[in-house]
Image (tube, rainbow, N blue to C red):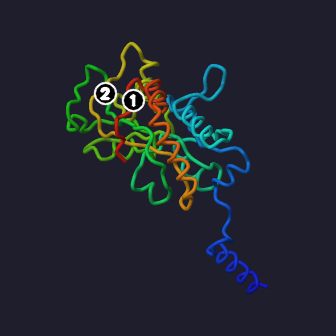
Amino acid sequence: MKRRNLLLSAGLIAATMIPGLAAADTLDDIRARGVVRVAIDLGSSPWGSMDASMQPTGAEVESARLLAKHLGVELEIVETTDPNRIPFLLTGKADLVMAALAMTPERREVIDYSQAYAVIPILVAATESTKVETLDDLNGKSVAVVRGSTNDAEASKIPGVTVMRYDDNPTVITSVVSGQNDYFVGPTGILNAINERRPQDPLVSKIVLKELPYGVGIRKGEPALKAAVDEWVQADLASGELNTIFKHYFGFDLPAVIEE
């Protein structure tokens, strides 16, 4: 019986390697169900959040709606968090991820990306009166970041810095607003959210560590889906619709050319 099960398992594995016997690709599945499931972090304003009517809003939500329209299907938002973005994609809970997913070599080992459709400026921020002119000024200081994020990786490269890691953006925001941390490493959008809650003593950008392009996360081995998403990126960058969304939420235009 055990030998029969082993042979059956081997046969199933082999079948997936024979052209014509592999399962239908994800783009076929999306079109068949008429819905694309996109993982979005709704606790990461201005990329994703809930409005006063408890409806999803934000730059990634609006961008995902454009993508769904381009594919000719409905959008289903799969709510996720920073640490769960890639696991949700790899386990099939979502077809795509649109959650400020910066392009990094480590992530490229496990997922594919669409062409870049926006950028994330990674900033070091502190109060206006705090002296931060070079990275050396951060020696011995602690900075707040989201655990496992690109911000975490960039902050970890700063010599002599203690990196205070939190599970999500709302927790980082609370830590800075409450005074637990005086320094923040992260994107403009989160800095804006911090300052909305501390208008009397706002943080300002001191140093731009990096400007990171980001794209739609796609499981590996999905060439048809990647081609369809790339087609959307090219079309809506050319039309200016993606820039309109970006400028609305971040206050400045996308670069003329987004370097990947």
- Number of marks drawn: 2
> Residue at horizontal 65%, vertical 50%?
93
Tag of residue 123: none
User: Which residue type carries mark 2?
Assistant: Ser
Image coords of residue 259 (percent x, y): 34, 45
Residue 250, relative to residue 259: is it above or below? above
Q: Nearer the viewer, residue 88 or 234?
A: 234
Q: Identify the image quadrant of the N terminus.
A: bottom right
- Does the image show residue 175? no
Tag of residue 188: 1
Q: Find residue 178 and report its image quarter.
A: top left
Image coords of residue 102 (percent x, y): 43, 45
Residue 134, relative to residue 23: is it above or below? above
Residue bearing mark 2: 205
Mark 1: give few (<14), some (14-19) or many (20+) Cα within 10 Å: many
Q: Are marks 2 and 1 in contact (CB under 8 Å)?
A: yes
User: Which residue type carries mark 1?
Assistant: Thr
> Residue at horizontal 31%, vertical 40%?
210
Disc 1 is placed on an element classified as helix
Image coords of residue 145 (percent x, y): 41, 38
Q: Nearer the viewer, residue 165 or 94?
A: 94
